[in-house]
Image: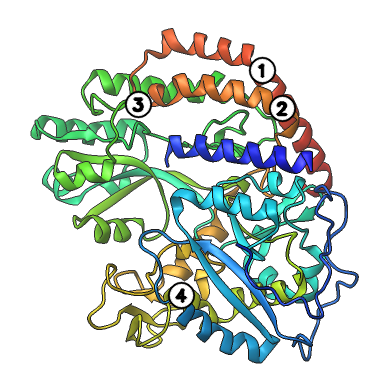
Amino acid sequence: MVKRITAVLLALMLVVSMAACDNGSAENSNANAESSSADSSTPAGSGTSGTDESKPQTGDLREENLITLDVVTMASGKEQADTELVADAMNEILEDKFNVNVNLTFLPFATYAEQTTLMLSSGDGADLLPVYMIPLPTCANAGQIIPLDDLLDQYGTGIREQLGDYIECGRVGDNIYGTTTGRDLASTQGFAMRKDLADKYEIDYENIKTFDQLKEALLRVKEGESDVWPVAVSAGENIRNWGWDPLGDDMVNLGVLPNMAQESTVVNLYATDEYKDLVTTMYTWMQEGLIQSDAVNTTETASSLLQAGTAFGYFTNLKPGYAEENTSALGIEIVISEMVDALASTNNVSRATWTISSGCGNPGAAMKVLNELYTNPELSNLYMFGIEGTHYQVVEEGGATNGQDIIDFADGLDVTTSGYRRSGTWLMPNQFIGNIWNGNAPDYWDATRAFNDTATKSKAFGFTYDSEKVNNEVTACTNVVAKYHKALLCGALDPEETLPKFNQELQDAGIDSIIAEKQAQLDEWLEKYGS
């Protein structure tokens, strides 16, 4: 109990920290309830993995008695008024196939981590849910979620087929505790910009690959547009990553694999030549007036400055369809320069993973439903988009390259009036088998899947770091990073003067202990699972 309470408090502290950087019991049928495969106090890596048998189950998968499961996820914006209507439609499919019903709960982004933490700690209100903004090891070590290995073998073979190697990123210790969502699971880094100004100043954005090439383009904009910042930042953050694997803590980078993560030696990012060169470039650009002068203190987003016409572009994580998505969202045409190749790391994958709560009385039924959400387009589309004719209409039947439809809001509806908004679909199990929203390329999901499959994989791909042994050092070092890191990347601090102080304070706060612990865990993992 003490361990669980401590884990909850740590998770809530993390939620508050991450928010600063960015951003009753439901009915369960207990008849014929399957006992949870892992005791709620079982730590990660104990070897208990789900059921007594792990052979794939075929034939009749129906439960003897009707089971009702609480399924929780996130949605932004207003309350989903038609949630029950959609749940009823989903239950027609699930009851016929499994004799299972679902209650759907949508939690707002602002309180999602806090509310799911409380649900998991109490064991009430959530059977199936994605863990997001809380480290997966925190939930696994506290016994709040159960290992899934045997359940996946028995009822979740479709999930394994859909995720391929990416399923390994839900591993904590020796067991898989979560399955990631079907979305962009790698990331490439680059610069997004207004096409009107790029065309005006004849910027060859498709072939910009280096900072020197980008600087040449930015200088043209600065010279020709006196009231436009060449580089805008979002709420004080300029660049989050430039080709390193943060090994589980991408906001603070306390021990990383640098240079596209192809070697297994964990290093202090802030003491590398790579980091020094990056922040020195940003400092030079700030001195030359290429980065907005109030970058460190601004509360505005870069996209809002582009919409207002006061900025040209910004650094960002990129993915297939990024330019098209943001062109639609901002109302101005956006183009991109990809400057860092796509890197797949556990951090990108495991930040959103579907889990089964240790409070779930019917884990087998939960896995059946989860597998169906990963593999059944009809059920997945209901969950993501609602009911055809009520919430959306088909614009082009079979128009997507994955065999699904191109869709849009039903007649008379928009994002403000629909009773079931398409919101937070990236956190739902598997977008790859679903419809494509009008305005996106017909091959959007196939292109995203190919992007994942061809990304360079980190040497530590599949490794999940557990900071429990060095929590005090992590807290102290996180406070040090907050003093310097974002300001350095905004170009507001002189690296020659700042980096020695920054690294000395990290040393004093215990970064060497963190790196040693990460290295030890990584070495052990590589012995078991490394190629």
| Dot 2 and dot 4 residues touching (CB under 8 Å) | no
Residue wearing tag 2: 470
Q: Which mark is residue 510?
A: 1
Which quarter of the image is occupied by the N terminus?
top right
Crowding around mark 2 (Cα neighbors within 10 Å: few <14, some 14 to 19, many 20+) is: some
Could you tell whether 292 is left or right of 19 in the image?
A: left
Residue wearing tag 3: 490
Q: Which residue is drawn at 67% across and 24% down?
A: 472
Q: Residue 83 carries which label?
A: 4
109, above or below 4, in the image: below
**Image coordinates for residue 2, horizontal then vertical, percent:** 78, 38
**Image coordinates for residue 275, horizontal then vertical, percent:** 49, 24
Pick the front one: 115 or 294 = 115
Could you tell whether 409 is left or right of 146 in the image?
A: left
**Image coordinates for residue 30, horizontal then vertical, percent:** 77, 76
| Dot 1 and dot 2 residues touching (CB under 8 Å) | yes
Q: Which mark is residue 23?
A: none
Task: Give whichever of discs 2 and 4 has the lower sequence position.
Answer: 4
**Image coordinates for residue 10, horizontal then vertical, percent:** 64, 36
Q: Residue furthest right?
A: 52
